[in-house]
Image: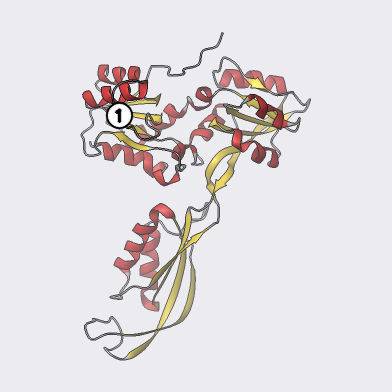
Amino acid sequence: MKIKEITSVIEEFAPLAYQEGYDNAGLIVGSPENEVKGVLICLDSTEAVVDEAISKDCNLIIAHHPIVFSGLKKLNGKNYIERTVIKAIKNDIAIYAAHTNIDNVANGVSFKMAQKIGLINCKVIAPKVNLLNKVVTFCPEKEADKVRQAMFDAGAGSIGEYGECSFNTEGKGTFKAGENSTPFVGKKNERHLEAEVKIETIVVTHQVDQVVQALIQAHPYEEVAYDIYPLNNPINTIGSGLIGELPKEENEMDFLKRLKSDLKTDGIRYTSLRNKKIKKVALCGGSGSFLLNDAMKANADIFITGDFKYHQFFDAEDKIIIADVGHYESEQFTSELFYELLTEKITNFAVRLSEINTNPINYL
């Protein structure tokens, strides 16, 4: 099995187009055409993880955090990033990362965290925009069903829990076929009036090309007219953080103690308690302080994430509890997510979880 066949399973779940602009998700070291002997899953690809991959005969490492964020100008081994990349290349080990793309899907990193603490009715806190397009085409009435279905099969027409969504308008189209054309209807050098259907449907950005190619293949006309319009509509299932509910209200300190246990963290930094039951919980795996205002607007009782700075804790203003559980601690279950994705789709292949704790922070 090739690397690209394995990584495509992850990218079908969390397309690379969903990553943030600063990110570097995808295949970082290695060729997508290389054959894979075994897969090692981890949170961070470090030198120790590469050594573990060698010992377990795994030549593909799948990590959450990219080992390379910005361009490498030299490979001299002067830091752990360069040493890790050099060791991987020397031992013919590929490194792949799914980072903010798997953060931004509704069933991704934050959802795995929400599962661990028993949240229900979860939804994205900050849906992403600028990921949608409207694709419009025009075709003869008798061919409309065929063209519509081809577009749907290629990925068009999904809005939330609804599929095959489109709007259709009947009208009249005109054209004059040139001397060197082969018109499906009408005659050369004569203006033709044809009863047509205008088909409008929604397409996510990374699927636009395949939808357009599908409609062209299904369309009877020699020259296919179509329009593509970028949209600012948010996608409610794609974005940062989640908000959900506890099945039953819990006392603040009881919940914090359970949170510490469920997330296997050695400590939680939190703001003043509000003497109020906790029911509505917002969270974000990794560094989620940028979502504090969104959590407050959603009337969450507590916001759980990692990497809050000292002065940012003041921003709670006794309107919400901030609970900083640690960056690693909030993302550690991502490895389970990778494992479940791969073993569900690839049942006869060696997929292993790393036994190395890559958390660089220790607690006393």
| Residue plotted at (53% across, 46% down) | 237
Q: Is residue 300 left or right of residue 228?
A: right
Callout 1: helix, strand or loop? Answer: loop
User: Percent x, y for residue 82?
Assistant: 32, 24
User: Residue 210 appears in which quarter of the rendering?
Assistant: bottom left
Does residue 286 lie above or below 222 as drawn?
above
Q: Residue at x 43, y 76 (%)?
A: 197
On screen, residue 127 above or below 327: below
Mark 1 lies on residue: 74
Depth check, front residue: 131 or 123: 131
Depth check: 37 or 306 in front? Answer: 306
Q: Which residue is at 30% across, 29% downward?
A: 74
Q: Quadrant of the C terminus?
A: top right
In the image: residue 323, left or right of residue 238: right
Q: Which image quarter is the N terminus in? A: top left
The amino acid sitting under disc 1 is Lys
Closer to the camera in the image, 244 or 91: 91
- Against 79, residue 161 (above or below) is below
User: Badge 1, how many Cα within 10 Å: few under 14, some, many 20+?
Assistant: few
Residue 73 in the image, given as x and y percentages of width and height? 32, 32
Residue 40: percent from left, percent from top: 32, 25
Residue at 60 percent of width and 33 percent of height: 289
The outermost residue toward the bottom is 190
Instruction: Indicate the quadrant where residue 80 lies.
Output: top left
